[in-house]
Image (cartoon, rainbow, N blue to C red):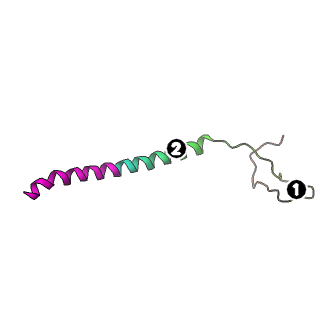
Amino acid sequence: MTTAATAPTRSRTKVLIWAGVAAGLLVVAAANAHLVYVAVMSQPDCIAHVRQGQAQGNVAPGAFSAAKSSCSIR
């Protein structure tokens, strides 16, 4: 009698485990899709930096420069 009574419980447990795994994978996929969306849609503003060819003598200490700036000089 114990095997007949435990069969529905095991089946339900398997279904719950697989549903949990599927839900976890869905959450991971949604998070990755969100990260890709944000990376593609965002365009950070230009920040002040030492431009290529700018005299290094009159630059504040600790200033940084971009390897290749995509910001236009204003």
Foreground: 73 or 39? Answer: 39
Q: Residue at x 24, y 53 (%)?
A: 13
Magenta-tinted stretch = 1-20
Screen quadrant of the C terminus: top right
Is 16 displayed left or right of 32 in the figure? left
- The label on residue 69 is none
Within-10-Å neighbours for mark 2: few <14, some 14–19, many 20+: few
Secondary structure beneath disc 2? helix
Foreground: 12 or 44? Answer: 12
Q: Which residue is mark 1?
A: 60
Secondary structure beneath disc 1? loop
Is 31 displayed left or right of 5 in the figure? right
Residue 9: in magenta span: yes
Tell me how far mark 2 sits from mark 1, CA to CA. Answer: 38 Å
Is 57 displayed left or right of 43 in the figure? right
Q: Residue at x 86, y 54 (%)?
A: 53
Within-10-Å neighbours for mark 1: few <14, some 14–19, many 20+: few
Q: Is residue 25 above or below residue 72?
A: below
Pinpoint residue 65: horizontal percent, then vertical percent: 79, 55
Residue 71: in magenta span: no
Pinpoint residue 14: horizontal percent, then vertical percent: 24, 53
Q: Residue at x 43, y 47 (%)?
A: 27
Name the kind of residue labelled 1 in the image: Ala
Name the kind of residue labelled 2 in the image: His
| Residue ranking furthest to the right | 57
Q: Which residue is mark 2?
A: 34
Q: Residue at x 75, y 44 (%)?
A: 46
